Image (tube, grey):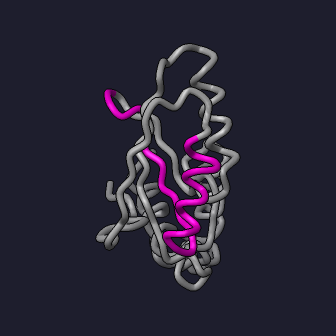
Amino acid sequence: MDALDKKIIAELQLDGRLTVTELAARVNLSVSPCHRRLRELEESGAIRGYRAIVDLNSMGLSFESLVFATLRWEDRDTVPEFEEAVASVPQVVQAERLFGEPDYLLRVVTADLEAFQKVYDEQLATLPGVQRLTSTIVMKRLVEDRPLKS
């Protein structure tokens, strides 16, 4: 990946709805080579897709919590069972496996505290292999979906 590819990616991170013509103009390239580079970036997986960034409040999801999960044991059966179960909980919008303790960080969004408690009690607390769950409420997001700098 060269500097021009990085510039294309940077522009698309700022506005993923750019036409190839607009993108080419922003990176000082003619349309055809820009389109070729864009297609190569997509095919290589450097650009994994395009999406809309949705305001959670407008969707009625104004309560956000970070849940830290520690497993009883991390054997080759428990880990995939836990991960598959987490992926099936629609209120978990982000999940990451961590080194050390805790084992996982889950970002959970719901309408309110009552809805979160229901998800916590009925879905998260019953995940396979869970030893302990700890949660904290997100007060404010300071940085979100920041474009990568090269």
Let me know if residue 105 is in the magenta part.
Answer: yes
Considering only vertical position in the picture, is 49 above or below 104? Answer: below
Q: Position of residue 24 (x, y in %)?
A: 54, 73
Residue at (39% x, 67% y) in the render = 144
Let me know if residue 126 is in the magenta part.
Answer: no
Front residue of 10/79: it is 79
Residue at (57% x, 74% y) in the render = 111
Front residue of 46/126: it is 126
Q: Residue furthest bottom?
A: 58
Name the side, left or right, on which 63 lies relative to 76. Answer: left
Considering only vertical position in the picture, is 95 above or below 83? Answer: below
Residue at (57% x, 85% y) in the render = 58
Considering only vertical position in the picture, is 73 above or below 112? Answer: above
**Image: magenta residue range:** 100-125
Q: Position of residue 61 (x, y in %)?
A: 56, 75
Q: Position of residue 80 (x, y in %)?
A: 63, 26
Q: Residue furthest right?
A: 88
